[in-house]
Image: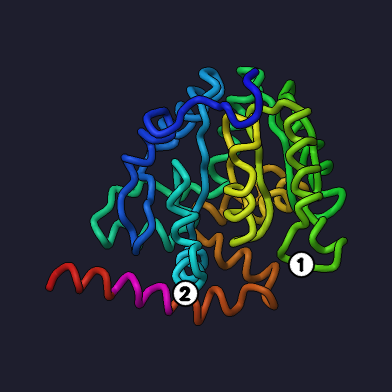
Amino acid sequence: MRPAGEMTGGAGGLGAGYRAQKREFLGIGLSCLPDEAFVDAVRQAVETRSRLTISFINPDYVLRGHKTAGLVDKMNRFDIVLPDGWGIVLGGRLLGLPVPDRQGNDDICPKMFTLSAERGFSNFLFGCSEGTPEKAAENLKETFPGIPIAGTLHGYWDVIRGHPGRYDEADIEMMVQTINEAKPDILHVSIPTPMQQTWVWQVADRLDVPVIITGGSYLDHLAERVYWYPGWVNKMRLGWAYRLTREPGRLWKRYSLDLMAYGGMVARARFGKRQ
């Protein structure tokens, strides 16, 4: 394994090729990859030890990206950016983009875990509250027998230190050292936006990990069960409603006022193009 910071796939490598394929969507580069192509990209990155960074956008992230200085630039640095939610799928299609399907963490990561179990790719789970990554790892091992879990580390260091939303440099160094010593093939970064985007680009050059993928609250889902959405919810495309009933206090504004604001952005982009 190469020393930290010497991962292949720089300006002309694997990641650059996927960045070039992204399509512009409300100022953010969106990947329009079928699931199979995405999984193959992960396989190539691990087998060739090439850096591949992966993130997601949903309507909330789009709005925050345009309200938070520098966040869109950080989003656009990721090699692959997948559509997290039907709001992005439908918005992208309205603007003429060939968005294949919803591809949030809950949708796409189980396919990565299947690949990991088959190929022996090791996963490191970083983020969420104390004990959550360990519970997530237990569920992964039960669901995908033989999957290598390189390590776990919670992400509440900012809360423990008394300054939520910001890590101390000493804690960042500890995180980097812990992850590198575990030598994972795939790193899951499950901390909030915009904190996760900032963290990735603070440490990417110091990490010896081929694949880095952000996850928001995904480890919370994994700690409960791997296939978090019931089948009927996925079939009826009601993931937003399912989440809203579970966390109404936190999500009511996201799925009402914010979703209307996002719809307005899509409408302006569509009719602006027609003009």
Label tally = 2
What's the residue at 39%, 35% (across, down)?
16
Relative height, residue 123 to residue 243 (above, below): above
Question: Label 1: which residue?
Answer: 164
Give yes or no for residue 262 being in the magenta stretch.
Answer: yes
The residue tagged with tag 2: helix, strand or loop? Answer: helix
Q: Position of residue 104 (x, y in %)?
A: 53, 49
Mark 1 surroundings within 10 Å by alpha-carbon count, few (fewer than 14), some (14 through 19), many (20 or more): few
Mark 2 surroundings within 10 Å by alpha-carbon count, few (fewer than 14), some (14 through 19), many (20 or more): some
Q: Which corner quadrant of the image does residue 268 belong to?
A: bottom left
Relative height, residue 9 to residue 24 (above, below): above
Q: Outermost residue, bottom direction?
A: 257
According to the image, what is the colour scheme of the structure?
Answer: rainbow
* Residues rendered magenta in the picture: 261-267
Q: Position of residue 236 (x, y in %)?
A: 49, 57
Answer left or right for 163 relative to 24.
right
What's the residue at 44%, 36% (across, down)?
35
Question: Label 2: which residue?
Answer: 259
What's the residue at 79%, 68% (across, down)?
163
In the drawing, what numbered circle is on residue 217? Answer: none
Instruction: Tell me the amino acid under the disc marked 1.
Output: Pro
